Amino acid sequence: MVNAPLHIITLVKWVPDAQLERRYNAEGRIDRSEGVLSELDEYPLEAALHIKEAAQDREVRVTALTMGPAGASTAAKKALQIGADDAYQLTDDALIGADIWATSVALKAAVETATGAAEFESGEPEYLVLTGMASEEGESGAVPAQLAERLGAHVVTYATALDLEAERLVVTRSGGTESQKVAVTMPAVVSVTDQANDPRYPNFKAIMAAKKKPLTRWTLADIDLRPEQVGAMVRVLRTDARPPRTAGEIITDEGDAGVKIVEFLVKERLL
Amino acid sequence: MSNVLVFFDELGEALSSAQKELIAQAGALGEVHIAVGAYTGDPTPALAIDGVQEVYLPEESLPAPEVAVVDLLETSVTESRAVVVLGSATADVTDALARLAVRLDTGLICGAAGISADLVVTKGELAGSYTTTSQLISATAPAAPLVVTFKPNNIDPQRVQTLVTRGEQPEVNVLPVRPSVGGVEILERTAMEVSARPPLTEARIVVAGGRGTDGDFTPLEELADELGAGLGASRAATDAGWIEHAAQVGQTGVTVSPQLYISAGISGAVHQRAGMQTAGTIVAINKDEDAQVFEIADFGVVGDLHEVIPQMIEELRRRKR
């Protein structure tokens, strides 16, 4: 039997640059004016490209999907430069302030629209969604499981290695107290950690080639959702900046600094 | 007072400190009900705690990533009539509670620090540089329960001890839930090395080392053991292979919030700071007086960690005698 083609949807997110000061704006939302492709989303993308390159006699397509404001198209373009075959960007004002619940509703519809639109030469494809281990700003790590529940897909989180076999994907993951090797059948959602691989950098040729790859922009209407279907379940009442840490006492070691540290800890009642 | 459902993905013979802390959080909100996913033997003696009313167990143990645990949770919510469901902010618990929130059509808040009686939740955001306050938007009536995961170390351990006291054995309900068939199959499980040191995310004190250790973590290990501390590292140290990757504190590693963080030979670039800046007190040792870590240290030493740390250990031992 010929293996069914595989459609890998990789979720990529445009996040505030963690190298810069990240802040909330007056509306209580994260300021997204200066962004980057989330570093944590380069690992699932690399994992997808690995699977594609290693697949013998199997048609594999890697699609990048991003949800975010207009500037997020840069994340989709970067994914195309790194090696994705095509990309989709979902942008809609109704998604501003989306919480985990609303994000997974929108992503479910976007994944289904993307898989529905793809045509494969060798038959009906199976699909696999790869994500980063968490978003860099939300840090909840809860979207993969919510997305899987909505898609009726299996979920495996915190993958450190992925190996595509004929009818299943074998994933090594780090659970709380143990390391596990699990087999999962498609459709599946797998979150990939930063221990899984070393992401590649796009070279000049790849950057030029990316200009010819399709990037499709969607609003909610394009994925058959109405604004009221993506209302948040959680309301943020207030955001308070933590007072910045200030420098305390700094001394230069004159042969007694170890003793001085212990004295400081005793004074602060930390021992 | 309202009913609270607490979820433990696994339970051994005794409760962990994070599990005790969750019971303390729950007890402040109302009557406590507990659902347990994976267990060996009889888990009820460990749950004989004042304020814990009922325990829900599956017919067979459900170790993660077993998806049937969501069925257990769904039934437990109905049985307990809980208005809020609490769990730890760990990978396996987050997976289960995230799916539960979809099934119940309700909101989820991850990584909380506190919750008030009227179910208003506070949590650190952007690596602790902000605190947000949020609550459930009740679209449905009667409202579905709010689902929350908590980070550890938000209640003082001594306070947890006074809040969590032995009580009568709770009533046990075995629910008709068994492991699912197909889908995700566990092929191999390897227990991670159990260190005598406390887990990084739960440790009250963390000792962390970076490039300045030059690859020798021995003095830091000794100091950590002297203080009963967890051992962490910067990305430079884990990337160099000097210490296991799991020890990495920072933006793409573990976020810690201990009462005391001792940073040794770490420059304190923004990626590192993101993982530790909510520590109660920060002590920094670095040879470079311009190291960024000194901008946020409560007590800083410009010096060589290979001289300062052994002296610290000696002084700590001297004071113990």
Image (cartoon, coloured by chain):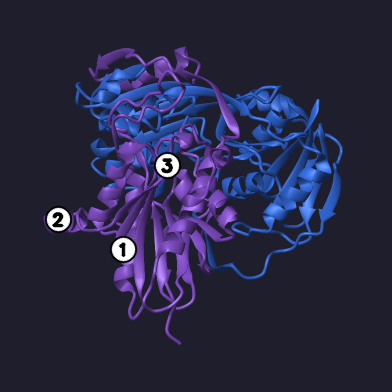
Chain colours: A purple, B blue
Give whichever of B304, A248 is nearer the camera.
Answer: A248
Amino acid type, label 3: Ser
Whether residue B318 is visible: no
- Secondary structure at badge 3 equals loop
Q: Earlier in the sequence, mark 1 or mark 3?
A: 1
- Describe residue A54's horizontal placement relative to residue B178 as left or right: left
- The secondary element bearing badge 1 is classed as helix
Instruction: Indicate the chain on which mark 2 is placed.
Output: A
Picture quarter containing residue B22? top right
According to the image, label 1 marks what residue?
A49
Q: In the image, what residue occupies the spot 37% across and 37% down?
A: A69
Check if mark 1's residue and mark 2's residue have beta carbons within 8 Å: no
Three-letter residue code for mark 2? Met
Identify the chain of the residue marked 1, using the numbered disc in the image: A
- For the residues labelled 2 and 3, the Cα–Cα distance comes to 28 Å
Nearer-the-camera pick, A248 or A173: A173
Q: Residue at x 41, y 66 (%)?
A: A7
Q: Residue under label 3, please give it.
A: A135
Chain under numbered label 3: A
Q: Which residue is mark 2?
A: A208
The picture places residue B147, in percent across and down from the top left corner, at 65, 38
Q: Is residue B228 left or right of residue B36?
A: left
x and y percentages locating residue B60 in the rendered image: 75, 62
Number of dots carrying numbers: 3
